[in-house]
Amino acid sequence: MKKAFVALSSLFLLAACSPASPATPGDEKTVSSFEECVAAGHPVMESLPRQCRHGDQNFVEPAEIPAPPVTNERPCTKEYMPVCGEIQVQCITTPCNPVKTTFGNRCEAENAKAANIVEGACVDEAANPEGACLSFDGTWLPETQECEGMGQEQCKTLGGTWNECATACRNDPQAEMCTTQCVLVCQF
């Protein structure tokens, strides 16, 4: 029994340590791409992108780069030449009249599919300061009727009160500590 165990262990050790038998000349396949490497049965490394190794060559799976979304919008400059346009809103129970909104320039109004675009800020903009704030890339705060990030010229045009250095904690009376930083604010 002991001799059989030693013989079997030696055979196992010899098989484990010996190099793999070379492929016969007729069995060798030409591999020139990731797909051919996988089809030849070589292991695939699960990485991003996936990789397959054949001999001393490494093949990488071609990445599928999604095409950018198709949009009818055109790029706009950030110049401030206000225009007034009407945006159609959807009401649940009855048809709604379009809402007049001031846009930073004609290009932004056209991208928003505004109708009846005219030069200059909307006259009745006080009814919709949120739309004006968003059209100037500002952040609208409905609780305090403020627009953060709007410039002085835009704020004055819309009839707001501009503060070039409002505190970041101005709307939080419970704040125990506030950083020293200025926030551009237009209050309506």
Image (spheres, rainbow, N blue to C red):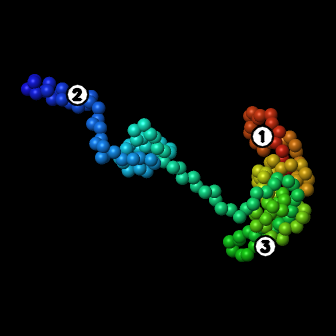
Which numbered dot is residue 169?
A: 1
Camera-side mark, 2 or 3: 2
> To which residue does mark 3 refer?
97
Cα separation, mark 2 vs mark 3, equals 87 Å
Residue 151: give x, y in percent of width and height. Answer: 86, 49
Residue 91: give x, y in percent of width and height. Answer: 71, 71
Badge 2 or badge 3: first in the primary sequence:
2
Assign a secondary structure to mark 2.
helix
Residue 161: give x, y in percent of width and height. Answer: 89, 50
Amino acid at pointer 1: Cys
Tell how many labels: 3
Cα separation, mark 1 vs mark 2, equals 74 Å
Cα separation, mark 1 vs mark 3, equals 38 Å
Quadrant of the rendered structure where residue 100 is? bottom right
> To which residue does mark 2 refer?
13
Q: Residues within 10 Å of mark 3 (few under 14, many from 20)?
A: few
- Is 73 or 129 nearer to us in this picture? 73
Which numbered dot is residue 108?
A: none
